[in-house]
Image (tube, rainbow, N blue to C red):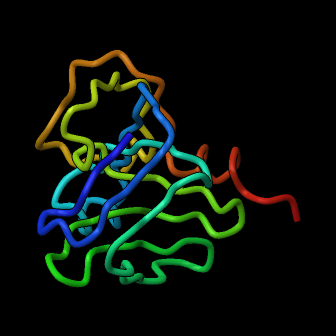
Amino acid sequence: MKAKCLCGSIEVIAPKHEKIGLCHCSMCRRWSGGPMFAVHCGSDVQFSGVTPSTYRSSEWAERGFCPSCGTHLFYHLLPSHEYILPAGLFQDQAFKLTSEVFIDEKPDYYELKNETHKMTGQEVFEQFAPPS
């Protein structure tokens, strides 16, 4: 899959994916202005052009964006080196919404009709937390 930021300064190449998840956490909503429609792309993601700027949003992740136009480019899980990209970057790609995380943080002002697998924030941390 190929994408670019709003100004075209950064191009993204990622493996083809058809499923997306939705994150309702307060940080994703603040970052994107709504829930994040997320494409889990693994570690095989390439960026060319201007180097993305990053913001370390937690001890385990950073968020990337174009330093010129501000387009949100990725959520990067540092321990696994997985990139999660906003579905909106890929203008010509058909996706199917299959999951929603942090459903317990979803505000009441929107509701989706899609049938999805839903997890609370606690369930996400329990499933994906590294072993201690």
- Using the image, determine if residue 77 lies above or below residue 62: above
Locate the C terminus and report the quarter of the image it occupies: bottom right
| Towards the viewer: 37 or 9 | 9
Q: How many marks?
A: 0
View extreme (top): residue: 115
Give how far across and how far down residue 13 sits, in percent. 42, 51
Find the residue positioned furthest to the right: 132
In the rendered image, the vertical position of residue 48 relative to residue 54, given as above or below: above
Kindly identify the residue that appears in the image at 24 percent across and 67 percent down: 30
Comparing 25 with 44, the one in front is: 44
Q: Quadrant of the N terminus?
A: top left
Q: Relative to 113, is 104 on the left or the right?
A: right
Q: Position of residue 2 (x, y in %)?
A: 34, 45
**Image x and y of residue 75, in percent:** 45, 63
- Pick whichever, 70 or 48, lies toward us: 48
| Foreground pick, 62 / 73 | 73
In the image, residue 6 above or below residue 124? below
**Residue at 52%, 45% in the rendered image:** 41
User: Which residue is rendered at x = 27% and y = 65% of the image?
Assistant: 72
**Residue at screen point 19% across, 53% down:** 34
Does residue 5 appear to the left or right of 78 in the view shown? Answer: left
Please identify the quarter of the rendering in which residue 9 is found.
bottom left
Which of the 4 image quadrants contains residue 103? top left
